[in-house]
Amino acid sequence: MNYDGDKTVAVASKSAVLAEIESLLDGGNSDLSSAGSAFSFSLSTGFDGFDTPATFAQFNRALRARVAVQQSDYSTALTALGNSFLDASGGLDDGVFHVFSSSANDQDNEMFEASDAAVIKLTVHPSYATDAEAGDLRFSSNVATREDTIKYDDLESFLAPTVWGSSYDPVPVIRNEELILLQAEAYIGTGDYTSAETNMNIVRTVAGLADYSGTDASNAEDRVLYEKRYSLFFEGQRLQDLRHYGRTAELPLDRDGDAIVTFPIPETE
């Protein structure tokens, strides 16, 4: 929503914001369909493979599927995924990325820091270790277990993120792995647990885990949330997933007085 400077106007609701995002994505997709075979401008290397109107439209539909799932509009999500770059047999890291460089007017990935540094800004909650399935390769590739415990502001952790290997590693906007799991989520929303299980098992195989069996209404939501938690680590989906399913009470609160709250909105926004 556009901010007109009047702070007395109520903040738009989640549903209204998602509807606006939906409108913008659908409008953009319509424009892309009549944009010809090439753009008149260049995109960053983070858009390699998605730098024509036709392939950028696949990226657009991927984002539209993410929004539709958050809206619990699962049939629309499945349609959008069918027009996205989802590839059940493709590389899980195929997708669009934020890229960084040392070039003038660019910046580095400031989230990166050596996991064994004396002091680190980002740590991982210990529950990420206790909740991981034994042998899950995503856990061992996402975090390192430190010999010491980092203590800051009454919080403690012995886990450091290792998802970035340098100050110029890219950050995903959306990847094929997320699309496979979004499709599983949409299948669950439509009651197709067999197809959802097939999708989740694609990801689990790569993670070194045994296939799920017997996925049904009693366990499907737990299963897809587990897969998204460990597959999309530090990709910005965990909190909104738990909000979507009304499960924020499951988030750990380690200090007296802490609560899951709405983030403050700057006056300029």
Image (cartoon, rainbow, N blue to C red):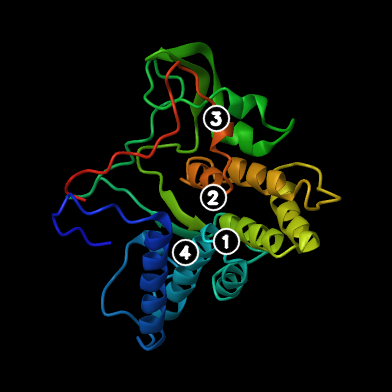
Q: Earlier in the sequence, mark 3 or mark 2?
A: 3
> Where does label 1 land, which residue?
72
Image quadrant where one finds the N terminus: bottom left
Callout in the foreground (1, 3): 1
Tag 3: residue type?
Answer: Val
Q: Earlier in the sequence, mark 3 or mark 4?
A: 4
Q: Give the structural element (helix, strand or loop) at label 3.
A: strand
User: Do labels 1 and 2 touch, CB within 8 Å?
Assistant: yes
Tag 2: residue type?
Answer: His
Q: Earlier in the sequence, mark 1 or mark 2?
A: 1
Callout in the foreground (4, 2): 2
User: Whole-percent x and y of residue 259?
Assistant: 44, 28
Tag 1: residue type?
Answer: Ser
Q: Earlier in the sequence, mark 4 or mark 2?
A: 4
User: Do labels 1 and 4 touch, CB within 8 Å?
Assistant: no
User: Do labels 3 and 2 touch, CB within 8 Å?
Assistant: no
> Where does label 2 land, which residue?
244
Q: Earlier in the sequence, mark 1 or mark 3?
A: 1
Task: Report which quarter residue 135 is drawn in.
Answer: top right
Tag 4: residue type?
Answer: Leu
Residue at the spot 38% in from the left edge and 62% down from the top edge: 16
